[in-house]
Image: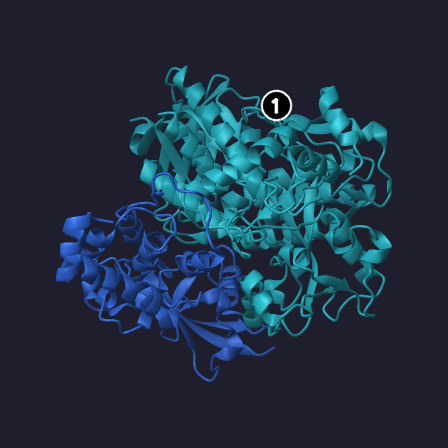
Chain colours: A cyan, B blue
Amino acid sequence: MTASSQHETHEHDVLIIGAGGAGLRAAIEALAQGARVGVVCKSLLGKAHTVMAEGGLAAAMANLDKEDDWRTHFRDTMRGGKLVNNWRMAQLHAQEAPDRVRELEQWGALFDRTENGEILQRAFGGHTFRRLCHVGDRTGLEMIRTLQDRGVHMGFDVYMECTITKLLKDGDRVAGAFGYWRETGKFVTFKAKSIVIATGGIGKSWKITSNSWECTGDGMALAYEAGAELLDMEFVQFHPTGMVWPPGVQGLLVTEAVRGEGGLLRNKNGERFMEKYDPKKMELSTRDVVARSIYTEVKEGRGSPHGGAFLDISHKPAEYVKRKLPSMYHQFKELADVDITKGPMEVGPTCHYVMGGIRVDAETGRSSVPGLFAAGEAAAGLHGANRLGGNSLSDLIVFGRRAGLAAAEHAKKTAAPTLDNSQIEATEREVLAPFARTSGESPYQIHHDLQEMMQNLVGIFRTDEDLRKALAALEKLKARASKMRVEGSRVFNPGWHLSRDLACMLTISEACTHAALARKESRGAHSRLDFPKSEDVWGAKNHVIVNKGGAMTLFEAQRPEMPAELKQILAEDK
Amino acid sequence: MAEVTLRVFRGDRDGGKAVDYQVPLTEGMVVLDAIHSIQAHQAPDLAVRWNCKAAKCGSCSAEVNGRPSLMCKTRMDALPHDQPITVYPMKSFPVIKDLATDVSWNYRVNKKIPPFQPRPGVEWKMDQRDVDRVQEFRKCIECFLCQDVCHVLRDHDKKQQFGGPRFFVRSAGLEMHPLDGASRTRMLKEELGIGFCNITKCCTEVCPEEIHITDNAIIPLKERVVDEFYDPVAMIVRKIFGAK
């Protein structure tokens, strides 16, 4: 009996890995094209990291500021990304986001309203106009519920609490995916003509992060192992405002909407320190700038008691704060004993988002591997060196839709692939190996050490020396991981689950470190103490990482020339 | 460092027992932190669901000292330390392992509810006041604590006939959407069995989002069902003017 016939197999035209905003939007579009769609996710449906998005979706709907249009949104996105963005993605995103938002509304999403009944928009860092469509500070929840119910009623098959450990190939193209049920530990194989990776980011490689346990870079690692290219991996966003106290909630996100609604940043001397770093935009400067500013204030001895900055919204009426920022109010009240309507919060930078990811075609989300697509945080290009707040939720629905469409079209003109049992058997052996060992470390310890190391050596400010140390440390961590031991049975075993996540985190952490070492300049979220300036020569290049015969290899890619029309938009001084 | 005892259910579908773990206390610690500490240092295979650790995803539901709670927002310093803190899985759902339960029934109930259906030719404008009312229901994070505490499910196991508070909240969010044109009253009466609810308000008490489940969702829906199926005047009016 062959390996694949020993366990359950499901067949789909399009398999989506990840059920956050991008995955669900891709699934809906593929269903609309008539494809048979399966969605695999590590958590229960509706719990993906999108649910934690707070501030809103950026779309130039011009409901409040009539001068806003896609051109301004495009310009803001490119400038925020320090011009290394994929300009075509930035253009499509700015042009299509308003339609995607209207679509959500037509599927039942309920956004906050303007006085004349339109969708309300709020100010956010780096956006010239009030642009973020929102639902208080729980926009992600509204979005994921809307997409989830839409998809469920259209009829996709959902495979919840299922971890994919390998993409299967048929020659050069993808043929399916192999994984296990988290609940039972039993294996499962998916056969698919197209696969869309929508697995989000890699925040869990860092100690202080806003990300949930799921954000372990799985999709990027799976795609990399399958031969796809990774792009811009040096650009990791540290959100300026995470909670700093108490220890258990360190890193938890404090939405940028606090600043969007008028929140002020001060140091322990009561100074509005953003005056020194960005006197024009102040608190609503881009995230890279605000994160570095807070970090610098703390480092130079002007931090708050628990090592952060003060963020204060208490000058606004208490009822207003509770209405516009309800979850922030409760979060601080219940977890930190702070009433934000009466006094300031303490905040500090937290690893939040990776601008890099799978290198994709702007129009279709197609990777370099035939049949393999990616969208959302797992894909790269739109955000360049720094993402603007609000551009992530809109990214998910604009490029989720495009990837779902292209994946369905690809499936239509493709014959069913053949699964190769030797690939399945190899991954089975690898996944089960930690159970067989009678000695070895726990994956928790190795994960803990990885997070400490990445926090200290591949953080907000980087140096050649630290990054080289990090690469050496990663080699040691990989060696330890190859000998780690898992206790207990295969039934719902978090230690075992972590051993798989850890393998992905190690691969993607290495990609981030390699790319950070190679970029000898500072740009956006990538700040080099030894190369503090941005250089034009680097601005023309992006870093691509690819698996060459098992070796992680980096090369430089030049972006195609921007069309004159877009150049002109960028040059306008607004 | 001060230590506290957690008494955690360890077991699976076939049964299990409570196991005591000593956990060092840290400032501001929540029950989920304590569970994570046990995983990292004592029992790596202790099964628990969690995602956001910020009361936004509704994954880490359990019964802490007998009370259905989100572990991520239950502070250790709010619980007495002179006796073990008990952490048990939600009782209304079958145990998979340790603190993880099989909540798949909820997803099947959700599928029965007709989705949002805009009225034909609707103009996409809404008043904030109308939106506010419905946004309360849409705050639900699907922690299923209301389902866990509801005696119709917990003590009488009416999962075949009854949808539970979560899905009355969801139905209310659709029914009271200012632009929705579908009717769900027959479904509420016949498939979700709203009549089984005798408004004891236990669901409202445990809701971490402080949704007024009974007063704002269930009672108005019960009224709609009564109007539609039991009100003779309304029946005549409908006969003349047609349904909603």
Q: Measured from the top left, where is residue A490 in percent x and y? A: 38, 48
In the displayed structure, does residue A489 sit left or right of residue A512? left
Q: In this rendering, does residue A220 appear at all?
A: no
* Residue sitting nearer the eye, B231 or A352: B231
Dot 1 alpha-carbon crowd within 10 angstroms: few under 14, some 14 to 19, many 20 or more: few
Mark 1, residue position? A549
| Residue B93 visible in this rendered orientation of the protein | yes
Q: Which of A361 and A378 is in front in this view?
A: A361
Which residue is at the far bottom? Answer: B82
Relative to A479, A170 lies left or right = left
The image quarter in which residue A231 lies = top right
SS type, badge 1: loop
Q: Residue at image x 72%, y 29%?
A: A543
Locate residue A428, reporting x and y percent.
Answer: 42, 35
Q: What's the residue at 70%, 32% (across, down)? A: A85
Report the number of numbered marks: 1
Is residue A445 shown above or below A387? below
Image spot of residue A187 (x, y percent): 36, 38
* In this rendering, position of residue A350 left or right of residue A189: right
Q: Nearer the viewer, residue A131 or A517?
A: A131
Q: Which chain carries label 1?
A: A
Amino acid under disc 1: Gly
Q: Which quadrant of the figure has residue A262? A: bottom right
In what quadrant of the picture does the C terminus of chain A appear? top right
Quadrant in which the N terminus of chain A appears: top left
Residue A2 found in image quarter: top left
- Residue A227 lies, in percent from the top left, at 57, 24
Q: Residue at x 76, y 41 (%)?
A: A524
